[in-house]
Amino acid sequence: MKYISHLLLLILFFFSSCGNKKENKMDPSSETVSLVDFVNPLMGTDSKYSLSNGNTYPAIATPWGMNFWTPMTSKMGDGWTYKYNENKIRGIKQTHQPSPWINDYAAFSLMAVTGKLKFNEKERQSWFSHKAETVKPHYYKVYLADYDVVAEVTPTERAAHFNFTFPKADSSYIMIDAFFKGSMVKIIPKERKIIGYCRNNSGGVPDNFHNYFVAQFDKDFELNHTWTDNWKLLKNNLNSKGEHVGAIIGFKTEKGETVSVKVASSFISLEQAQLNLDREIGNDSFETTKNKAKLAWEKELNKIQIEDSNTDNIKTFYSCLYRVLLFPRKFYEYNKNNQIVHYSPYNGKILPGYMFTDNGFWDTFRAVYPFFNMMYPELNSNIVEGLANTYKESGWLPEWASPGHRNCMIGSNSAPIVVDAFLKGNVKDKDVKTIFEAILKNAEVEEGRPVKSVGREGLNYYNTLGYVPYNVGVNENVARTLEYAYADFTIAKMAEKLGKTEVANTYFKKSLNYKNVFDSSTNLMRGKNKDGTFQSPFNPLKWGDAFTEGNSLHYTWSVFHDVQGLINLMGGKNDFIAQLDGVFTMPPDFDDSYYGGTIHEIREMQIVNMGNYAHGNQPIQHMIYLYNHAGVPYKTQEKIRDVLTKLYSATPDGYCGDEDNGQTSAWYVFSALGFYPVTPATDQYIIGSPLFKKATLNLENGHTFTINAPNNSKKNYYIKATTLNGKTTSHNFINYDAIQNGGEINFEMTNMPNKNWGSKTEDLPYSLSKTNKLKL
């Protein structure tokens, strides 16, 4: 924790000395502020089906925790479980939801009421106000106005500690709602305990799926009820099992009396749930649990130290970093022998080893996992072990897991994730063979996939023709072709490092398949029929159809590994730059006919006044950085600063589209630091425009890497010059090893573009077409 006070003193120093050129001495005894206090878990919660400002909920959790907790303002089963503009709370639930579109699983909730017993979720809901709500990553507190009750919760990885502070009342109640789709509760008065399970899910689970829970109270029960299906109350009853059941305990309370509840759960058994509770909370007080959770966040947030005078940007940065550190969730537990085990959401068995879940790789391959490789190599090594276990248990790598395979999105993006980790030394030796076998299977076998999103839909066409045809009944065919080609590049890179030259050459060649869907008459990617003719008519503004949640103007840039090859196809740098510029300068016109209505992703593009640039969705998020490949990085710098400052804020409407498991936040974290991983499975980050005067990365290997931009300001966002470890450099990228080895990069910032910096051929980033691997 030594860095925390150091960092916060520096922050306070900048706040007090902004505009003062004299150097002030820092007082080591000055009061410091917790980094957690910069985080707003409500960022992105002002969302709805028709317009996403993040589509988030306040996740009260520890980093990558097995369980999150969140207040419910919406009914059971509603993916938008917490809407900022709603006014009533139905309970505080354990949630595992990665996205409202994927929805939740294994959820149950706690709620307190007084007076007349109300347990139906609609009847029991209480008015609340954000003015009487405290929301931190490690702590949630709310005043339930209808009952004069203050509810608090603080988490561990697999458990949580609740406090309910009651008024003086003859009838006070706490209830556990075990939710629908199969549940059980059992009240054990002598032990002041409620046990049970819930089985609710939205798919992706075996038949024996259960979430077992144990709730330990610190007050005797004077009343015991349960309810059964259709909200039927069973008075003076200790057991209930059915489609949807719950438990109610009651007692008299004095004014200001606090009743504590310690809750834990397990996907393995009730005994394991009790073990999780004993191990993670035990005899700890609420304040002890709260402090431990806070320290868990302080440890992680402190790995990146920001020094700047702009508190709004600092709040946005740490709020985004908090989101990056939530998913994928740990789906493993420690048995009585302290061994790592997991319930498999693929075959229903209890097996040894790591398991992680709740992630859509179509989103997160772009920046979340590259961030883990940079800052959390050990964690990423464990995640890859979990992916190897998924392959062993289901026969396939996941693409969207929650908790098992889910049919959502496209691509073969498990390959970039595992290959990037392998190339950076973050795959355990025992997992290398399994992982390589798995990514080759994705690229070679179409039959037997558990859901369409796993493996490669349309693979046999792709491997025969070099693209997925437009007219063979495989939707989003151009998007698939482009993503498969990039995945092939990453397979080639892994094969190359393993010394499998023939395999590497095969997949390097296949990675050029992006060329097969490029239409030179429009300089855009376009659907191609099985007979080799392009789809007609063609509207580049048409969302969906041949593309995924975007149009041709968005997906044309999805040639991550060979931007120079794309430049060549477009006729050279000038045409390439003009095409990039055009996306921003044109009006936000669109064709939504494929969907039969304007989906939220389209609306989010339309309203931000950035032309057809759709930052609220993932396919285009790397696009601004491609100016660097064309030798005009100053254009990247001005547009990056626009997005950082206009499309993000630490407020309930703080995102410009779906946050998506940390990806849209990871874009901000990387870009605010000054660089971005355009091409995972290479060793380069493309330089943009750093947002802060100073940022320090405290790396896992013990080194520190510092990013200095002392004259950075709202106007000074162009790069005039750079030095790396004291040596002048004009490369518009930085290598992975340069960061991991420690040191510092210095940016001299200015208010005028330096069109010479980063513009020479030798200054440009990697592209496959510039290598000598193949005659391309």
Image (cartoon, helix red, strand yellow):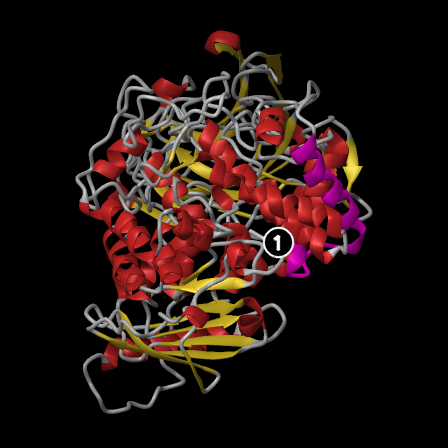
Could you tell me how many numbered marks the image carries?
A: 1
Q: Which residues are magenta?
A: 420-444
Q: Is residue 438 magenta?
A: yes
| Residue displayed at 77% across by 43% down | 434
**Front in this rendered view, residue 307 or 89:** 307
Q: Identify the residue at image location x=33%, y=20%.
A: 595
**Magenta region includes residue 570:** no
- Pinpoint residue 648: horizontal percent, then vertical percent: 29, 51
Give the residue displayed 35% in from the left and 18% down from the top: 123
Percent x, y of residue 646: 23, 53
Callout 1: SS: loop
Q: In the rendered image, which quarter is residue 28 located in?
A: bottom left
Residue 772 is at least partly visible in this image? yes
Q: Does residue 553 lie above or below 592 as drawn?
A: below
The residue that disc 1 covers is 774
Q: Is residue 333 visible?
A: no
Residue type, numbered disc 1 = Leu
Relative to the observer, which residue lies in front, 156 or 162?
156
- Label 1: how many residues lie within 10 Å, few (<14), some (14-19) or many (20+)? few
